Image: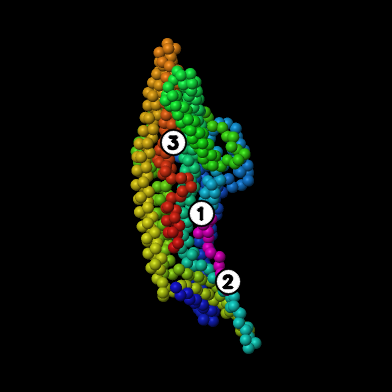
């Protein structure tokens, strides 16, 4: 757009009433300036993040900004590491020590600074010009204020306020994601550690059986084929144990990364067993509606659409005139009295009426609306899927606990009686012990799956998609950023 300036001097505008609009505008500007001077909040808006996070995880997130808070967090981390971790203490540890999460909290400070800037006038611009010739010197001075920014300040503040509130939801979204990932990693690490013990027992039984078979085959009391079968089982048990040991290391390292622990903090302790299965499964009421009301990604998508709508309104308000500055000017020339007046700078919509910007803003708004609808549909579907997985895992773990493991135990007791009565061989007794251990490992895996699906269900109900990694960000934020280019 073409910008033009209109300057009136005292010689051109001598009527007394000509300065009244200037005075009224200056007074209004001063009032708006004083009323609109936003300041940084003491907690940076993190109190809302803590509340949202605690409602969904039971733990309080911390944003470590001053050194004192960092020292306090370090002391608490050292204290937690002295005891075997629970799922809750692991989440607390991750909130204190996960540097990636702390880095994501910094987005909140950036959003708040934008909000504060939106509530303040732009700095005035000052121009100075000097011309000389034929012994005369002419000097022009002017100072300009962004009048358009002043007039659109309330709407701009609404846009930035919506973005700031979205940043709070985003911070809570990240914290809930880290908490869910930590809980899943914790249960997987404990189960993997427990499975190593049972796979070790299988290997010991297989080794004893193989060695006995070898000796009996050597004395001719055992067929070569049966002896090789026992040897093959021992080889398979050895490989299975090696895989289980690596899986335990991998799961522990995954948990270590989420906890943000360094190489000097790797000796953290885990319990020997997973928590017991609850007495009954939960039956969430109005699960899909709860997800619509509580899920952070749904709330973020709604807030994003709202912010984009406000941004669209701002674009409509400034589509024709995008620059409007007003200020004081004076001119002095050698041998003449100084002239005073005012100066207006505005953008003339000769080549660009803002149609392209308006179309872009409208498309961005419709994009946000449709994305919000898709997020809501996904959330409802994920709740249904998560509950099905949770219920299946509970029933399966309960089946192992109440049916499979007790039955295998009774069979083992009966086989022991038969072995004592010399009705079965030692190989049959060893095979039975292996099968009993296999039933226990099946129960451990089912119990692990239950606790993981329990975490997924709680996450799907109130937090975010259980399939999303904590490092992923919802695309709604990108839409909001795109919509902010008004």
Q: In front here: 432 or 145?
A: 432
Say which mark, if any, is on residue 111. 1
Asked if residue 447 shows in the view, the reply is no
* Residue at horizontal 51 percent and vertical 81 percent from the top: 12
Question: CA gap, disc 2 to disc 3?
Answer: 63 Å
How busy is the neighbourhood of tag 1: few (under 14 within 10 Å), some, or many (20 plus)?
A: many
Work out whether mark 3 precedes mark 1 in sequence or the reverse, and give the earlier one. 1
Q: Disc 3 designates what residue?
A: 452
Q: Are marks 2 and 3 in contact (CB under 8 Å)?
A: no
Name, please, the residue furthest toward the top.
421
Say which mark, if any, is on residue 126. 2
* Residue at horizontal 44 percent and vertical 73 percent from the top: 1
How busy is the neighbourhood of tag 2: few (under 14 within 10 Å), some, or many (20 plus)?
A: few
Q: Is residue 201 above or below residue 384?
A: above
How busy is the neighbourhood of tag 3: few (under 14 within 10 Å), some, or many (20 plus)?
A: many
Q: Which numbered disc, 3 or 1, marks the residue closer to the eye?
A: 3
Q: Is residue 176 above or below residue 160?
A: above
The boundaries of the magenta stretch are 113-127
Question: CA gap, disc 1 to disc 2?
Answer: 29 Å
* Residue 206, image x, y percentages: 47, 25
Q: From the image, which quarter does the C terminus lie in?
A: bottom left
Q: In front here: 131 or 298?
A: 298
* Residue 390, image x, y percentages: 38, 35
Work out whether mark 2 precedes mark 3 in sequence or the reverse, and give the earlier one. 2
Question: Does the magenta-highlighted stretch encompass residue 125?
Answer: yes
């Amino acid at each position: 757009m073409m910008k033009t300036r209109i300057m009136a001097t005292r010689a051109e505008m001598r009527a007394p009433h000509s300065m009244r609009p200037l005075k009224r505008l200056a007074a209004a500007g001063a009032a708006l300036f004083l009323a609109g001077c936003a300041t940084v909040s003491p907690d940076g808006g993190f109190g809302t993040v803590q509340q949202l996070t605690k409602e969904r995880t039971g733990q309080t997130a911390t944003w470590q900004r001053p050194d004192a808070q960092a020292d306090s967090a370090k002391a608490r981390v050292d204290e937690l590491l002295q005891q075997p971790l629970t799922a809750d203490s692991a989440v607390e540890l991750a909130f204190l020590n996960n540097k990636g999460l702390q880095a994501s909290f910094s987005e909140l400070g950036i959003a708040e600074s934008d909000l504060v800037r939106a509530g303040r006038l732009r700095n005035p611009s000052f121009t100075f010009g000097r011309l000389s010739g034929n012994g005369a010197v002419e000097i022009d001075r002017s100072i300009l204020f962004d009048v358009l920014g002043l007039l659109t300040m309330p709407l701009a503040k609404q846009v930035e306020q919506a973005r700031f509130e979205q940043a709070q939801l985003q911070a809570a979204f990240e914290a809930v994601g880290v908490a869910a990932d930590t809980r899943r990693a914790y249960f997987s690490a404990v189960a993997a550690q427990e499975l190593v013990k049972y796979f070790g027992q299988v290997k010991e039984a297989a080794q004893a059986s193989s060695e006995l078979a070898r000796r009996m085959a050597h004395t001719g009391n055992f067929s070569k084929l049966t002896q090789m079968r026992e040897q093959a089982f021992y080889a398979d048990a050895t490989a299975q144990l090696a895989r289980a040991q690596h899986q335990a290391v991998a799961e522990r390292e995954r948990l270590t990364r989420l906890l943000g622990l360094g190489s000097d903090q790797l000796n953290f302790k885990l319990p020997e067993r997973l928590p017991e299965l609850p007495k009954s499964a939960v039956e969430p009421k109005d699960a899909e509606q709860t997800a619509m009301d509580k899920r952070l990604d749904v709330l973020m998508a709604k807030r994003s659409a709202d912010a984009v709508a406000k941004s669209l309104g701002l674009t409509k308000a400034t589509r024709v005139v995008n620059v409007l500055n007003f200020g004081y000017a004076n001119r002095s020339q050698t041998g003449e009295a100084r002239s005073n007046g005012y100066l207006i700078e505005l953008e003339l919509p000769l080549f660009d009426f803002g149609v392209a910007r308006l179309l872009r803003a409208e498309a961005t708004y419709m994009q946000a609306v449709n994305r919000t609808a898709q997020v809501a549909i996904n959330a409802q579907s994920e709740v249904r899927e998560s509950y099905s997985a949770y219920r299946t895992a509970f029933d399966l773990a309960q089946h192992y606990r109440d049916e499979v493991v007790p039955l295998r135990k009774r069979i083992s007791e009966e086989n022991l009686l038969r072995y004592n009565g010399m009705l079965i061989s030692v190989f049959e007794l060893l095979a039975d012990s292996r099968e009993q251990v296999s039933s226990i490992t099946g129960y451990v895996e089912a119990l692990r799956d239950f606790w993981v699906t329990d975490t997924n269900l709680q996450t799907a109900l109130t937090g975010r998609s259980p399939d999303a990694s904590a490092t992923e960000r919802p695309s709604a934020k990108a839409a909001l950023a795109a919509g902010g280019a008004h």
